[in-house]
Image (spheres, grey):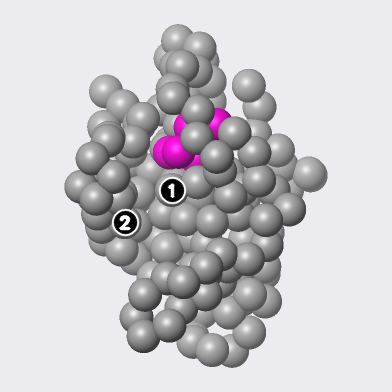
Amino acid sequence: MTAPTSGRTRSPATSSSYTTLQDSTPPPPRDTDAFLHGDFLPVNMLWSRGRITGLVDWNGAHRGSRAIDIGHCRRYLAALYSPEWSDQLRSLYESIAGVPLNPWWDLYALLHHDDSQPKWIRGQVAGRRPVDAAGMTSRIEVVIETALRRLG
């Protein structure tokens, strides 16, 4: 298992956590496949009166663990907002869906952070809110550390 980096670099903590996941854990666990969006982010959600009414940008749709889509969104929320927002999404999802997210696949999605993310997140936000690019990696590292503890 390798995470795509396309020549990008990871922070030392993210890289170390990814190596730990790759080398110190058994192979990826089987999880119930779900239909995944593949780019499940707030910028791809359509909203009306405080409710999600649709999703756009389906070119990455595939099957896999639901924790991958939620983990991808958690990484984005941690980068743009806070580790607390990221953890709140996981908790809310698990309570509403009635199923726990597989911590291995959640961590796998979280570890796809690299040095290109501040640039593309800034582009996606397009001035609609301030972007603290300098703090993104440290916020994601907090979420990764929490996910590692959940993994055991």
Q: Residue furthest left?
A: 95
In the rendered image, which quarter is residue 82 located in? Answer: bottom left
The overriding secondary structure of the stretch rendered in magenta is: helix
Measured as percent of width and height from the top left, residue 128 is found at 54, 89
Residue type at mark 1 is: Ile
Measured as percent of width and height from the top left, residue 88 is found at 26, 57
Residue 14 in view (yes/no):
no
Taking 8 as reference, is 1 left or right? Answer: left
Query: Which residue is depicted at the point 50% across and 28% down?
Result: 33
Taking 117 as reference, is 12 left or right? Answer: left
Tell me the tag on residue 79: none
Residue underneath mark 1 = 70
Residue type at mark 2 is: Leu
Give the distance between the C-alpha atoms of the residues marked 1 and 2, in whole angstroms.
8 Å
Residue underneath mark 2 = 89
Query: Which residue is depicted at the point 51% across and 79% down?
Result: 131
Measured as percent of width and height from the top left, residue 39 is found at 60, 54
Q: Residue furthest right?
A: 7
Measured as percent of width and height from the top left, residue 58 is found at 67, 56
In the rendered structure, which segment of residues is drawn in magenta? 64-68
Decide which of 72, 110 is in the foreground and name it. 72
Q: Secondary structure at mark 2?
A: helix
Does 22 sit above or below residue 139? above
Residue 33 in view (yes/no):
yes
Decide which of 61, 143 is in the foreground and name it. 61
In the rendered image, which quarter is residue 116 located in? Answer: bottom right
Along the polypeptide, which appears first: circle 1 or circle 2?
A: 1
Q: Quadrant of the C terminus?
A: top left
Magenta-colored stretch includes residue 66? yes
Q: Secondary structure at mark 1?
A: helix
Mark 2 Cα shell of 10 Å, populated few (<14), some (14-19), many (≥20): some
